[in-house]
Image: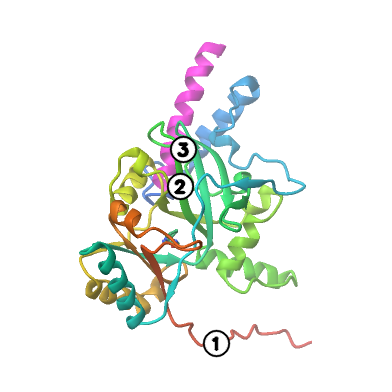
């Protein structure tokens, strides 16, 4: 194949592989068999070997591209990553609602599952993933771009060529956690205490190949620069993120008042055991960005959002049957 044809074919392969990856890992609805995906990937790798100048950073072949690092570079967040104040019971939620309505009057809330993983910030420029970082102290995080690229539900290129700063939670599904600890137990290695620690430990690996082996996943839940994109509410921002190709959590609900919030929150206390990932509570946010602006934030946390923490279950320690020698 001559270079001109190769350029066109590589672009088509990027489009196909990104689409099939999106269908499989974001929609969980693959439209082609894995063998077709693998065949196209092999074709791309062969063309990139034949024409190295066609191997770009955003290529689907470069998800596990990075060399092992010596250390993580620090990153200053364009917009600080705030943390959440906590509510522990219905009264705390009603107090939150009262404070909010005193300030801004009638509000709608968006209720989301609180994914128990690691908060990350993702930067995209003209539709391309350019940098990912941990929360750190909220102002300065660690650059874990190469590790985040290994998460298959993280799009390397968006469906629109926009520049966005996105917040999300990287997590390890329960099944992946169990398999990982089973493997570590067989190798006599120290076990991870929970999926959150396993996800954090995986993303802090200096070698992306280790992160790639950990089957991490990602839900995005915030668009930091939504207002400059002319979006008026958090619920619209989440719909837009989904249209861009991100994986958003479908179990969210817009509630008209705190009674609906409380009913929804309590319904998930029991149901969460059936989820394929761990949640440690719910996050309640004022929907309107104008009202969020009016409410503002303290040094640490927004006044327009609160986390409701589920009571910790009594930890039933799973005795690992120890081979009695
Ligand atoms: N772990 C979660 O699922 C989660 C965490 N945080 C937020 O939003 C915070 C972020 C900054 C202000 C509101 N939403 C979430 N869903």
Residue 5 counted in the magenta span: yes
Residue 251: image location, x then y, percent: 32, 63
The answer to whether the beta carbon of the residue marked 2 is less than 8 Å from any atom of ligand 1 is: no
Report the span colored magenta. 1-24
| Residue 258 in view (yes/no) | yes
Mark 2 and mark 1: span between their CA atoms?
Answer: 36 Å
Q: Is residue 51 above or below residue 113?
A: above
Q: Is residue 26 above or below residue 325?
A: above
- Using the image as rendered, state which of residue 179 and residue 253 is in the foreground: 253
Q: Is residue 260 above or below residue 149?
A: below
Task: Give left or right: position of 192 versus 303.
Answer: right
Q: Earlier in the sequence, mark 2 or mark 1?
A: 2
The residue that disc 1 covers is 316
Residue 36 numbered mark, or none: 3
The answer to whether the beta carbon of the residue marked 1 is less than 8 Å from any atom of ligand 1 is: no
Magenta residues: mostly which secondary structure?
Answer: helix
> Which residue appears at 56% of the width and 68% of the height?
195
- Label 3 sits on a secondary structure element that is helix
- Label 2 sits on a secondary structure element that is strand
Q: Are marks 1 and 3 in contact (CB under 8 Å)?
A: no
State ligand 1's quadrant: bottom left
């Amino acid at each position: 194949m001559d270079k001109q044809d190769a350029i066109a074919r590589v672009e088509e392969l990027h489009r196909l592989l990104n689409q099939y990856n999106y269908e499989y890992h974001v929609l969980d609805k693959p439209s082609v068999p894995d063998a077709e995906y693998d065949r196209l990937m092999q074709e791309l790798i062969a063309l990139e070997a034949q024409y190295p100048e066609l191997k770009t950073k955003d290529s689907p072949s470069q998800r596990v591209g990075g060399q092992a690092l010596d250390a993580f570079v620090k990153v200053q967040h364009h917009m600080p990553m705030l943390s959440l104040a906590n509510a522990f019971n219905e009264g705390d939620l009603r107090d939150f609602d009262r404070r909010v309505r005193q300030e801004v009057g009638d509000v709608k809330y968006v209720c989301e599952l609180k994914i128990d993983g690691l908060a990350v910030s993702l930067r995209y420029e003209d539709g391309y993933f350019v940098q990912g970082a941990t929360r750190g102290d909220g102002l300065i995080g660690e650059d874990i771009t190469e590790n985040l690229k290994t998460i298959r539900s993280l799009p390397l290129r968006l469906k629109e060529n926009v520049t966005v700063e996105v917040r999300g939670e990287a997590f390890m599904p329960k099944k992946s956690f169990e398999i990982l600890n089973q493997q570590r137990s067989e190798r006599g290695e120290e076990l991870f205490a929970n999926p959150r620690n396993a996800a954090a430990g995986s993303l802090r690996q200096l070698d992306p190949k280790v992160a790639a082996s950990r089957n991490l996943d990602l839900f995005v839940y915030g668009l930091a620069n939504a207002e400059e994109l002319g979006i008026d509410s958090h619920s619209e921002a989440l719909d837009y993120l989904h249209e861009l190709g991100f994986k958003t959590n479908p179990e969210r609900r817009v509630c008209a008042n705190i009674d609906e919030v409380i009913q929804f929150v309590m319904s998930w206390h029991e149901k969460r055991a059936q989820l394929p990932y761990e949640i440690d509570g719910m996050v309640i946010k004022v929907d309107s960005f104008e009202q969020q602006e009016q409410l503002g934030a303290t040094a640490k946390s927004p006044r327009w959002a609160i986390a409701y923490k589920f009571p910790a279950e009594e930890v039933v320690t799973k005795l690992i049957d120890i081979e009695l020698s």
